[in-house]
Image (cartoon, rainbow, N blue to C red):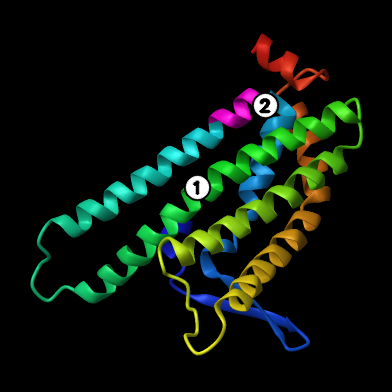
Amino acid sequence: MLNILGLTRFLQLGSIGSWPIVVAVGALPYPITFLCTDLISELWGEQKANQVVWVGLLLNGWVLLILWLGGLFPALAGSDESTFRTIQQLSFGSVGASMVAYLTAQFVDVRLFHFWKTLTNGNALWLRNNGSTLISQLVDTSAVVLISHYGAHVLPIQADKAVMPQLVAFIGSGYLFKVLAALADTLPFIWLTGWLRRWLDLPLQDSEDATDQG
């Protein structure tokens, strides 16, 4: 759904001085995916988290297939063809960009999560949650913006202005939004980790060991 909504509308969530904070509508719920992979990493280990990342990639492929089939067959007379074609064009561009960014950022997130976990001997839950997400979100945002522009040409770039400052503004806006979302989910992440561990009756031991035994 994020890839269908993706770049159909850009929202101005505020501004810092003369710099507007602009975010694509499809990016609004996206930080939740990093919360999910962090929870899976904590509870079931790195291998399970990576498996979920691959499932996400397959779902992206499914979106592309449906959009392709939807444009392959003839439309009923009177259908709003222009709207569908616009959404299809934007979605093809955003899916291509997000598939590359998604894989890269999510694998970075999972790897860094376990790096911080090993470094702190399983302590400082807040550090591995934020330390992995803040870096991976920068990778994700930069990749999406650059590929969306140079690979798919679907960003609303103003032709009469320099391109690079506009791209930097898109990256900065998107990353700032995701940073604030990542910091806001720290307490929910800590609470959900404890609650899910109890609810699912998971052992209080290293997640990798729990994965092997499961």
Whole-number angstrom distance, CA of label 2 to CA of label 1: 20 Å
Q: Is 106 contained in the magenta span?
A: no
> Considering the numbered disc 1 on the image, is that residue within a helix, a strand or a loop?
helix
Q: Measured from the top left, where is residue 183 in percent x and y? A: 80, 56
User: In the rendered image of this protein, does residue 26 appear above or below residue 62?
Assistant: below
Residue 45: quadrant of the picture: top right
User: In the rendered image of this protein, does residue 182 appear above or below residue 176?
Assistant: above
The mark total stands at: 2
- Left or right placement of residue 141 versus residue 133 in this view: left
Q: Residue drawn at (68%, 35%), measured in percent from left and top?
A: 110
Q: Which residues are magenta?
A: 46-51
**Badge 1 density bin: few <14, some 14–19, many ≥20, Cα 10 Å:** some
Residue 212: quadrant of the picture: top right
The residue under label 1 is: 100
Q: Measured from the top left, where is residue 164 in percent x and y? A: 60, 74
**Is the magenta region chiefly helix, strand or loop?**
helix
- Left or right placement of residue 172 versus residue 78 in this view: right
